[in-house]
Amino acid sequence: MLNPLILFSLSKPERYDVLRQWYSQLFFRWYDPLTYFSIWNVMLYTFITLFLDEVPIFYKLKMNVLYQTFLGGFYITYIYPKNIKVQYLNIILTDWLLYTVDFLSHQLLFFHSLFYYKQSISLSWIEFIIINIPIFLYIRFFPVFYKYNIEEHNLVHLCFIYLFTLYFFT
């Protein structure tokens, strides 16, 4: 696996060789990026913002998915720092590269929606269940512990943080 940060310490010919070797080993199918919840996040954000933002349940769904990825990215990057192995790209995200990817794919989208699209968010129990279907499906059908390099207690912590903050802020 390639750690892109090592490229800065290599000379130009060495960098070229490392990148050529990495590229020759690169193979992924078109659906491999869809195994990351961050991609779901960006797709839902884009689609709902462009077409369905005026429909209250879709706005709540978008904000919920953005909030879940905000919490998950923040937890994995800052509270319990890990490296993330992006299998389909054959790279390891660490240090400032992990911070940059987290900011661009999780934090920025959440805060943009939070501050520029203000609608009140109050949830009934039915709406709460509906807007959490994507994360339940994701946790059920994708190997989150392996993919995000987390343990079961980390997921339990995230669930408690999510439910606690959702209870007090909605």
Image: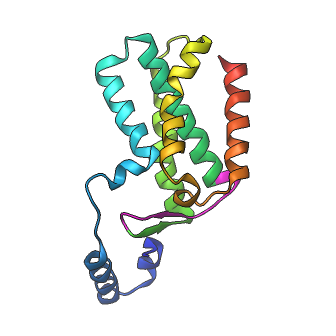
The residue depicted at 47 percent of the width and 23 percent of the height is 61
Q: Based on the picture, tell me whether residue 85 belongs to the magenta stretch.
A: yes
Residue 104, x across and y down, in percent: 45, 46
Residue 48, x across and y down, in percent: 35, 24
Q: Nearer the viewer, residue 108 or 148?
A: 148
Q: Nearer the viewer, residue 146 or 108?
A: 146
As drawn, 163 above or below 154: above
Residue 37, x across and y down, in percent: 46, 44
How many numbered circles are shown? Answer: 0
The residue depicted at 73 percent of the width and 20 percent of the height is 168
Quadrant of the rendered image containing residue 8: bottom left
Residue 39 visible here:
yes
The residue depicted at 41 percent of the width and 78 percent of the height is 7
The residue depicted at 41 percent of the width and 50 percent of the height is 35
The N terminus lies in which quarter of the figure?
Answer: bottom left
Q: Based on the picture, tell me whether residue 13 belongs to the magenta stretch.
A: no
The C terminus lies in which quarter of the figure?
Answer: top right
Q: Which residues are magenta?
A: 78-89
Residue 115 visible here:
no
- Seen in the image, is 145 located left or right of residue 48? right
